[in-house]
Structure formats: C-alpha cells, structure tokens
Amino acid sequence: MTTIESRTHQRRQFGAGVMLIIFMAFAVFQINVSTGIAKPGGGPKLAIFDIVPDTPTLSSSATTGSTFFLTGKIYPFRTVNQADCSVPSGATPLGTWRAWGTVGDGGKLVLHQTLRLETFNSTIEVQGTTGQMAENADVSPVLPGTLAPTAGPAEILAVVGGTGRYEGINGAANIKPYCNPTPTGTSPFRFDRAFCFGLE
C-alpha cells in the first residue's frame, strides 16, 4: 500500500469513526429525553376529574361578605354517580380539593381553588367569581369514546397556574354540578354537591 493509499484509508476510517460517534450521541440524547409530562397548550381538554366536597358544605343562608373554606376529594372522571352524587365503596381519591373565599352579591362566590393531586405530585390553581356560564355548557373527557357529563349547566372559572405536570398552565375550568343541580340562570353553583372539573 502506497503512502497516498494509506492516508486515504486513514481518512475513511476517521470519517466513519466520527459518524459513529455522532450517531451514538444522537441515540443517547433520544433515550434521555423526558416523556409523558403534560404541558399546557391549545386544543382538547388536558384533564377532567370528579370532585366531592366534604360535608358540611357552604350553607345557602351564608350572607354577603361572609367567608368560607371548603375541602373535598378528587376522583378520576366518572367515579361519581351523576344521578345521586354517590361514590362507589373502595374508590381511591387522586388528591384533595380546597376552596376558600367570600360570598358575593346575588349568591355568587368569589373564590380560589387548589386541586392538590397527590397521585401526580401536581397542583392546579383556579380562581374567579361563580355564575359565569361556559359558552358550550359542557365538559368533554380526555379519552375518546367516553361520554361527557349530562347533568346540569357548566360554569367557567380561570385557571391561573399549577405545578408538576400542570406547571405554567392557564386557561379555563368548566365546573359542572351533578345530582339535580340548580337550573341555568337562577343562581350560581355553591359547591354543595359533587361536580365535574374540566380543564381546557
């Protein structure tokens, strides 16, 4: 083998080695990319849950200006029986719901809600004044093929942030009460029964 042939052979080996290193680095990068973390964005709903407030809930006789603090349990969507708000025995909650605020005029509530989803090590923060109806008056599920809740009108509140898989999220939360809720237009929902929480 001549000197020129030897150098050409070395260059080819070097080029092949560089290409192999680049390919391996790309493969390692692909393996280490984090997957499965939900991020906010447009399009379909990102999450939907059933929430069951603990008793006693906010009294219908609470006067304007009075403050309140409510708690409850968060369950996977369609855990709660929409007709009677019952929860099957053995149902495992995903986390804890808390809401606090002030009773406003006309029975509206000015409130902040925190959904602490211990199962996902995440939170969702929601705030606003009750009584604003959602345009589509519906809450849609995440998974295709499942049915949306059919009971009651949907109110809308603002999603103002979150942590974990819901870090930096914003948008709207549709609140749809179960088990014979008050008809549309007569009074705002007072979190006196189980409800569906849909995150847009």
Image (cartoon, helix red, strand yellow):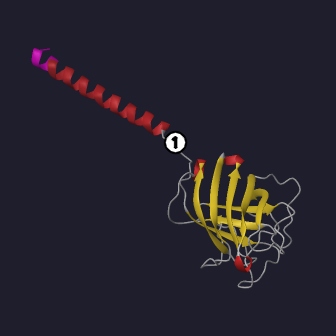
**Residue shown at 87% from the left, 53% from the top:** 90
Magenta region includes residue 35: no
Residue stretch in magenta:
1-6
Q: Is residue 172 above or below residue 162?
A: below
Residue 121 in view, yes or no: yes
Q: Is residue 84 above or below residue 26?
A: below
Seen in the image, is 178 located left or right of residue 198? right
Q: Main secondary structure of the magenta part?
A: helix
User: Could you tell me the amino acid type at mark 1?
Assistant: Ser
Q: Position of residue 54 (x, y in %)?
A: 84, 60
Q: Looking at the rendering, which quadrant does residue 7 occupy?
A: top left
State left or right for residue 180 relative to residue 168: right
* Numbered disc 1: secondary structure: loop
- Which residue was labeled with disc 1? 34
**Residue 153 vertical position relative to residue 145 in the rendered view, above or below:** below
Please tell me in which quadrant of the rendered image residue 128 appears: bottom right
**Nearest the camera: 115 or 165?**
115
Q: Residue furthest right?
A: 89
Residue 49 falls left or right of residue 159: right
> Which of the pair 162/121 is nearer the observer?
162
- The part of the image, by quadrant, that contains residue 111 is bottom right
In which quadrant is the C terminus drawn? Answer: bottom right
Looking at this view, is 17 or 63 the one in front? 63
Residue 1 drawn at (x, y percent): 14, 14
Percent x, y for residue 187?
74, 81
